[in-house]
Image (cartoon, helix red, strand yellow):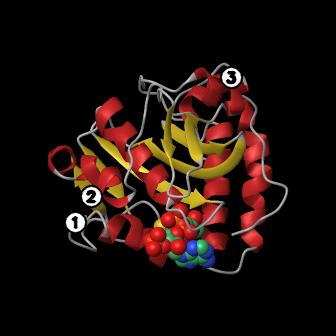
Amino acid sequence: MRLEPPCKVTRDKLTFDVAEIEPLLQAFPLDMEPWPEAMITLKDGRVLYIREAKIEEAPVLLSYVKKMLDVDHDFYDIVGARVYAEILGWYRKRLKDPFTLIGLIDGQLAGLGNGRMFSKDIAVSLHTMTFSRGVRMGWVMYYAKTYYALEILGASEWWSTFESYNGWRMAGVEMAQPQYPWPTMQHELGGSPIYYVSKNYWNKVIKQYLRTMIGSDLIFDVPEEVKQKNRTLIVPSDVTV
Ligand SMILES: CC(C)(COP(=O)(O)OP(=O)(O)OC[C@H]1O[C@@H](n2cnc3c(N)ncnc32)[C@H](O)[C@@H]1OP(=O)(O)O)[C@@H](O)C(=O)NCCC(=O)NCCS
């Protein structure tokens, strides 16, 4: 767009350093407490160690998640494509206040759950993925990020939506999450309905979810041996979902 200046000017060009533009494009971050790392024993006896992904691990996570785009069942392709964009958005600093929790078994990437702080009160669930199926690992990862948002980051509401039947069952149905009126309110993932967990509902009911649905709970005092086994992130060589 071009208009004639309404005033005489002594320079008719201004130049910007990209470092001056960046603060306008990058969101100003909230102060976020870190996820304290945790572990849980899964239904099959394996120990899942959950920690926050490090930004320098984004490229290796991207390389694995990209493979999900070729999975033609259970909505892995659309969820994989979106998770790819979210990890890249975090890496390239184009997502406001994101968090990415990864679940590891003996160092091997087995699950992922991410979200972001929309504001200091509202936390948005982005996606949950399990790369080793059949043991409700996704349920654990979804619970862990809900715990993080409501217990540690201090959000008063947690907003989710679901692309897949398995995701809807895992959190929409089994947590009996209420919904906001639609289309008046829409989740940022494609404008679908917002399912929500308030802090009150969390405290009264959902906090017990893992005990009820998995039969065990998160342990935050992780033994050195478990930390040691998960020191180095390994991405699986194959896709077995
Ligand atoms: C949704 C998701 C995270 C759920 O995680 P999960 O519970 O660890 O994963 P599964 O789908 O393997 O298992 C859920 C249940 O379905 C059964 N199941 C369904 N399809 C299965 C399959 N192909 N292989 C093994 N188990 C399967 C499991 O045995 C389990 O049964 P149970 O409830 O009786 O224990 C996972 O299915 C996933 O990553 N899907 C693709 C991405 C996605 O849809 N994410 C959510 C977006 S809304």
Gap in angstroms between the C-alphas marked 2 and 1:
8 Å
Query: Type of residue at label 2?
Result: Tyr
Single out the mark in the foreground, 2 or 1: 2
Position of residue 79 measured from the top left corner of the image (x, y, whole percent)? 59, 66
Q: Please give the label number shown on residue 180.
A: 1
Task: Tell me the SS state at disc 2.
Answer: strand
Task: Tell me the SS state at disc 1.
Answer: loop
Quarter in which the C terminus is drawn = bottom right
Is there a contact, CB below 8 Å, between mark 2 and mark 1? yes
Q: Earlier in the sequence, mark 2 or mark 1?
A: 1
Query: Type of residue at label 3?
Result: Ala
Q: Earlier in the sequence, mark 2 or mark 3?
A: 3
Q: Please give the label number shown on residue 138.
A: none
Ligand 1 is within 8 Å of the C-beta of the residue at disc 2: no
Q: Please give the label number shown on residue 196.
A: 2
Q: Please give the label number shown on residue 19.
A: 3
Query: Type of residue at label 1?
Result: Tyr
Does residue 67 appear left or right of residue 185 in this picture?
A: right
Gap in angstroms between the C-alphas marked 2 and 3:
38 Å
Q: Is residue 52 visible?
A: yes
Gap in angstroms between the C-alphas marked 1 and 3:
40 Å
| Number of callouts | 3
Position of residue 7 measured from the top left corner of the image (x, y, whole percent)? 53, 28
Single out the mark in the foreground, 1 or 3: 1
Which residue occupies the foreground of this view, 61 or 91?
61
Position of residue 188 measured from the top left corner of the image (x, y, whole percent)? 42, 60
